[in-house]
Image: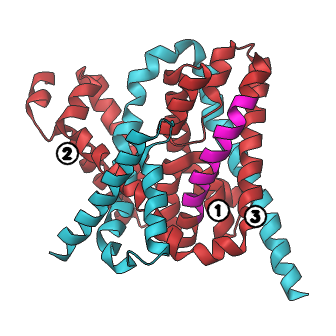
Amino acid sequence: MKYLHEAVIIASITFAAEIIKFLLPLPIPASIYGLILLFLLLKSGVLKLEQIENVGGLLLELMPLLLVPASVSFLTVLDMIQGMLLPVLIMGFVGTVVVMMVTGMVSQALVRRGGEEKKA
Amino acid sequence: MKDLFAACSCFGLLLAAGSYQLARVINRRVGKEICNPLLFSTLCCCAVLLLTGTEYDVFYENGGNILEFFLTPATICLAIPLYRQFALLKKNAGAVLAGCTAGVLAHMAGCVLMLFLFRMETAEYISLLPKSITTAIGKGLSEELGGYPAITMATIMLTGLFGAVAAPGLLRLFGVKDPLCQGLAIGTSSHAAGTSRAVELGEVQGAASSLAIVMTGLLTVIAAPVFARLAG
């Protein structure tokens, strides 16, 4: 029954996030509101980590599987993007590599510098 | 075959979860990660749908939707690693902010380059701007700025899938060894899909990647309209 309790808490936060999304006319998904809401609840101590840890951990572990339907839906837009296929492929592959490299290297340079200052 | 699939309420769920698990079993047997479960499962599902002439809707309505249903609560739970590692992230706030900003700007610069390289229409160029962010924000932003949501969706999905599959190898290639920076790089470049992989790499990676989703979303919402005007 511990799991049911955790599931109800997580479902309630999801519900609250969906209400926020319904009320605010921004192109922001409920999941982002929920992420911020859950973080604030944990940070303020209203919710304890132990109250959601098991079911939350399970959901996080399953996340790649949950993304399969969205990835497969690529098939449905394929015929709509035919003229744009090459730019889409370049941005999808090369663009992703470049962004990953830039963010990784810039942040690593700053983290390292922070570390060196402390040593000195 | 198609009618049979349509009659089985768990067809989509079984196909997706079964092939996902098969990839994991293969990896365990070999003792090395040779086949990425997300990629393997996606390819299996696409292959079955294409070979049997089954529509995506049949897959989605017979179990695929169950998986997708849990995506929102799962994304919300990214707050858990974020909360656990908050002290570390706060200590490195400068690196987080600079890393995400640099990533978003690099992406926007790439879009401008594509605009000139392919002599794209303004609407096509705008469709590429929100590519590194989570689907729901990206689609909304693309519509608002006057892009084609289908192109945006396709680019976002491809980005996420590629990021999730290739992130560990690419990070090794670029010498990004710090767990915090690995997480930031994954979250900034490939949103929630990449983050699902970051969580597997470690808790710090997962936390940094989750924070990067929020930061990148925010920065893109601010920067995209500015870059959209460049083409107009």
**Residue sitting at 41 percent across and 41 percent down?**
A23
Residue B177, picture quadrant: bottom right
As helix, strand or loop, the secondary structure at mark 2 comes to helix
The first of marks 1 and 3 along the sequence is 3
Which callout, 1 or 3, points to the residue nearer the camera? 3
> Extreme bottom residue here?
A119
Decide if residue A79 is on the left or right side of residue B181. Answer: left
Relative side of B189 to A112, left or right: left
The image shows residue A21 at horizontal and vertical percentages of 41, 43
Let me know if marks 2 and 3 both belong to one chain: yes
Magenta range is: B208-226
Which residue matches tag 1? B182
**Marks 3 and 1: in contact by CB < 8 Å?**
no
Chain of residue at mark 2: B
Of labels 1 and 2, earlier in sequence is 2
The x, y position of residue B156, in whole percent, is: 53, 35
Both marks 1 and 3 on one chain: yes
Q: Which chain is red?
A: B
| Residue designated by label 3 | B95
Chain whose colour in the figure is cyan = A
Magenta portion: prevailing SS class: helix
